[in-house]
Image (cartoon, coloured by chain):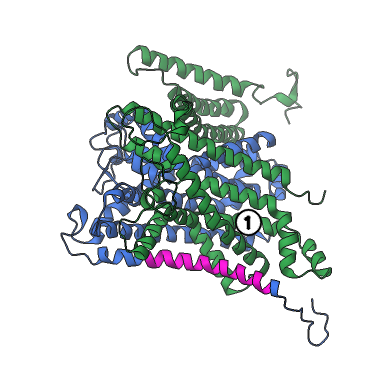
């Protein structure tokens, strides 16, 4: 429509639009402006250090307002709204990323110096009151408790998902599906209370603490995750494979064992690994039913054990005379935990990528 | 498939089949048994607290309900504030990943957000108290002085930043990944034809999202919010470490007198509890279980209702 009266305009396609790069220039401009404002605030003594997060955040807000105003004047209200929403969506993303960056930065900065001291992996906290000591007892506890939880949950979870996909019809299957959903929502602390109540009743000892109780609590949290992910994976196996197997006269159970599970094993492994990654960092249930100790305890079925997450918490919560020693250990344990969880996540993704069967195309 | 011949051909029942299908049913039944056991054991252990006489309970509470009410209030209040923060941001991030960012970048960003979900809660607790609380305290003081007329910001401002608002921010960060994941899945399922039809009619990208994506995804957003709420209600360690608790029912979000949450109260009290104290804590855990059960059931109901009609597209 503007092409008719576009006499003096060189390119009618770009009339009524903001030139390229305007958005970025406005964004950087508003960041710089707010940066200057915060530098002035700092010089005036308003803040002790330069408030980078504040400058970035308020700069982005200023950008949102500016871009709406500029676009409204040049491009009209519809385009202006579109630009406003685009920048708001990007702002939301930046807000979501900020805590992650801050968290990773803090944990690495505070945890790394203590973690790379070899004693952290070779010593326990027995008879350690000040600096020194390590998380050996916590690492042993975490590995044992989590491994046993996986030992309980994987067979139950996998068999249940096979039941739901291959056998389950009618009321029982519907009930199990519903209850698995309910179990997904059980707060971790309630799982810990359950394990405690269970063992306190069985043993008659109200002060009951053991690593095995922790494994039971973690399996309550882990089973629904395993069921959900394995179920999704088993459903992905094409029915043609099952029918081809039946047509060759293979019984149903062998079809499941030799055809369905091998086809979906990569997905199932990924799901199990992610489930382990989810429960390995649990603190609350272990605090309740496993308790904490400063010595190495290899026996899962007797007495208190330490785990990395509880170690991190107790080092923070029960600081001794020199708080820095305890905080350093807490951060180092947190970093170790994050590294383990991230490694598990990476392994899960690698397994999924490398071993998944190439279906079709 | 029956072919119409009278008496369908029966397969021979094999031993292996019976054992295998039997064991899968047993595994399923174990799940039923576990949930029943959770309910039964929690109820059995909490009865002494429910029937306790005045003077026996902690905090000098006359009965269990008086004891648990500030905790229930704190749990719901903290989770509600967290939800108010997290909902718009997770919708924004989900839209950014599903409709704004380039495909390759979007996948990478999805991983980054998922990583946030993998961080253990005790690490969030450490971060919340060591980094976030000191960082926001000056801002709280400013809010309290200048916006104090707003009822929530009134009261004596906390000197440490360990308030329920800080807890809510930490909780919001923690529930963001799950909410984003659910929203993203739903937004990606929007029928391509609806989106292209809107664009073909001359809609801008935002108008396309408003008319095609958001109406389609609304039940998904609701269920994401409910799932996030369920997580926030049950979160323990981050709250236990960050909050400076008191036995109060207070809407002020900037003071150091904050209502505690059920989960955090259990984690803080349990290691030193004995006798009836243990029963009281277990009973409060039962209350938490019921609350999260209701929230999750509503979320599932919304999701399943959506499944019923999404096939029509």
Q: Is residue B152 above or below residue A145?
A: above
Q: Residue at x 50, y 17 (%)?
A: A32
Residue B292, quarter of picture:
bottom left
Compare residues B303 and A103 and report the one nearer the observer: A103
Indicate the chain coloured green by its letter. Answer: A
Q: Residue at x 80, y 62 (%)?
A: A240
Q: Residue at x 46, y 17 (%)?
A: A35
Q: Which residue is tagged 1?
A: A230
- Residue B215 location, x and y as percent? 59, 51
Q: Main secondary structure of the magenta part?
A: helix
Compare residues A107 and A61 and report the one nearer the observer: A107
Compare residues B4 and B278 and report the one nearer the observer: B278
Classify the position of the N terminus of chain A by image quarter. Answer: top right
| Region rendered in magenta | B17-41
Q: Is residue B27 magenta?
A: yes
Chain letter of disc 1? A
């Amino acid at each position: 429509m503007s092409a008719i009266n576009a006499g003096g305009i060189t390119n009618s396609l770009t009339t009524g639009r903001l030139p390229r790069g305007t958005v970025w220039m406005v964004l950087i401009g508003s960041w710089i402006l707010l940066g200057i404002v915060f530098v002035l605030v700092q010089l005036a003594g308003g803040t002790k250090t330069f408030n980078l997060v504040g400058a970035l955040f308020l700069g982005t807000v200023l950008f949102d307002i500016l871009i709406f105003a500029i676009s409204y004047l040049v491009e009209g209200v519809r385009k202006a709204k579109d630009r406003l929403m685009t920048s708001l969506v990007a702002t939301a993303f930046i807000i979501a990323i900020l805590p992650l960056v801050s968290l990773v930065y803090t944990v690495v900065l505070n945890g790394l110096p203590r973690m790379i001291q070899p004693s952290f992996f070779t010593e326990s906290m027995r008879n350690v009151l000040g600096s020194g000591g390590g998380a050996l007892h916590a690492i042993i506890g975490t590995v044992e408790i989590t491994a046993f939880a996986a030992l309980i949950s994987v067979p139950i979870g996998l068999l249940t998902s096979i039941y739901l996909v291959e056998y389950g019809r009618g009321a029982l299957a519907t009930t199990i599906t519903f209850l698995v959903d309910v179990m997904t929502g059980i707060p971790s602390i309630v799982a810990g209370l359950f394990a405690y109540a269970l063992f306190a009743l069985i043993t008659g000892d109200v002060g009951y603490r053991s690593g095995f109780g922790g494994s039971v609590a973690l399996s309550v949290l882990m089973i629904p995750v395993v069921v959900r992910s394995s179920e999704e994976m088993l459903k992905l196996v094409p029915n043609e494979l099952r029918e081809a197997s039946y047509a060759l006269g293979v019984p149903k159970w062998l079809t499941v064992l030799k055809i369905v599970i091998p086809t979906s094993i990569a997905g199932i492994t990924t799901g199990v690994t992610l489930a382990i990654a989810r429960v390995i960092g649990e603190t609350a249930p272990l605090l309740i039913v496993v308790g904490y100790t400063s010595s190495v305890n290899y026996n899962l079925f007797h007495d208190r054990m330490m785990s990395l997450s509880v170690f991190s918490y107790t080092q923070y919560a029960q600081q001794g005379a020199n708080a820095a020693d305890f905080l350093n250990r807490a951060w180092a344990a947190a970093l170790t935990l994050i590294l383990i969880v991230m490694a598990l996540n990476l392994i899960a993704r690698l397994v999924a990528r490398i071993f998944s069967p190439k279906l079709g195309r | 498939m029956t072919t119409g011949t009278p008496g369908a051909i029966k397969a021979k029942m094999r031993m292996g089949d019976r054992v295998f299908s039997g064991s899968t049913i047993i595994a399923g039944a174990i799940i039923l048994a576990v949930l029943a056991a959770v309910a039964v054991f929690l109820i059995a252990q909490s009865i002494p607290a429910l029937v306790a006489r005045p003077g026996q309970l902690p905090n000098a509470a006359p009965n269990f309900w008086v004891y648990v009410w500030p905790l229930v209030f704190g749990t719901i209040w903290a989770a509600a504030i967290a939800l108010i923060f997290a909902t718009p941001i997770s919708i924004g991030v989900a839209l950014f990943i599903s409709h704004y960012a380039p495909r390759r970048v979007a996948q990478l960003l999805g991983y980054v957000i998922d990583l946030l979900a993998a961080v253990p809660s005790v690490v969030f607790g450490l971060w919340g108290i060591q980094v976030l609380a000191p960082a926001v305290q000056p801002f709280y003081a400013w809010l309290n002085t200048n916006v104090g007329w707003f009822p929530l910001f009134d009261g004596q401002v906390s000197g440490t930043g360990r308030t329920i608002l800080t807890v809510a921010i930490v909780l919001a960060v923690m529930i963001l990944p799950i909410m984003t994941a659910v929203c993203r899945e739903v937004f990606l399922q929007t029928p391509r034809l609806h989106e292209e039809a809107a664009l073909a009619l001359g809609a801008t990208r935002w108008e396309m999202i408003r008319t095609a994506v958001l109406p389609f995804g609304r039940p998904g957003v609701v269920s994401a919010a409910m799932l996030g709420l369920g997580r926030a209600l049950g979160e323990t360690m981050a709250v236990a470490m960050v909050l400076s608790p008191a036995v109060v029912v207070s809407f002020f979000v900037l003071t150091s007198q904050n209502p505690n949450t059920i989960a955090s109260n259990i984690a803080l009290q349990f290691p030193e509890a004995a006798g009836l104290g243990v029963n009281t804590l277990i009973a409060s855990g039962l209350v938490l279980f019921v609350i999260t059960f209701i929230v999750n059931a509503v979320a599932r109901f919304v999701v399943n209702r959506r499944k019923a009609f999404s096939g029509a597209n």
